[in-house]
Image: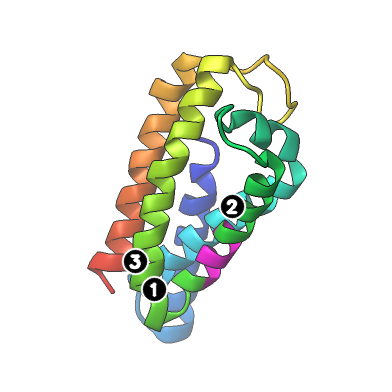
Amino acid sequence: MKLLSIIAITFILSLIATRLIEGFWNFLFSGNLAMAVFVIFTGVAHFKYQKGMAMMIPDFFPAKMFLVYFTGILEIAAGIGLMIPSIREITATLLILFFIVIFFANINSSKKRINLFKGDFTGPGLGYLYKERLPMQIILIAWTWFFGIYLS
């Protein structure tokens, strides 16, 4: 849930800034900026923690490092796409699908007790999946839908 603080802090700071600069609370901009910062941050993490990320991918997938880098690039591109009004809705839709697909990597990771940051098997296990990761995925999907599709 620590990662969700990125969204919350960015959202609050952006709301304050838009109020001061534009004279109104720009929820649409602030909500999309918050998710954009989040997915860009996690996309960059694919390049820093590539070993742990590769370990998360189920064994039947080939070219794990390629998938790690490719999905990192996709996340960074999605962050940019959320900030472009003409492609925001399609970006949000694809991002929601991405969040659903990567949840399967999170299930695999939890079963194997993968520590993403260390790239070993000292991770928190299934407790983390149910207590933190699943609720976080639901929040990410709901946030992306609300600001990227519903309000757009």
Q: Are marks 1 and 3 in contact (CB under 8 Å)?
A: yes
| Residue hosting label 3 | 148
**Mark toward the start of the polypeptide (1 vs 3):** 1
Secondary structure, mark 3, is: helix
Q: Earlier in the sequence, mark 3 or mark 2?
A: 2
Q: Which mark is residue 117?
A: none
Report the magenta residues as a range: 75-80
* Residue located 34% across and 66% down the image: 148
Q: Can you give x and y, in whole percent of width and height, for residue 79 in the image? A: 53, 65
Q: Look at the numbered discs 2 and 1 and tell me whether their residues touch, using CB distance below 8 Å.
A: no
Determine whether the residue tagged by mark 1 lies in a helix, strand or loop.
Answer: helix
Q: Amino acid at mark 1?
A: Arg
Residue extending furthest toward the left? 150
Q: Label 3 vs label 2: CA separation?
A: 20 Å
- Read off the residue under disc 2: 71
Q: Nearer the viewer, residue 83 or 97?
A: 97
Q: CA distance from mark 2 to mark 1?
A: 18 Å
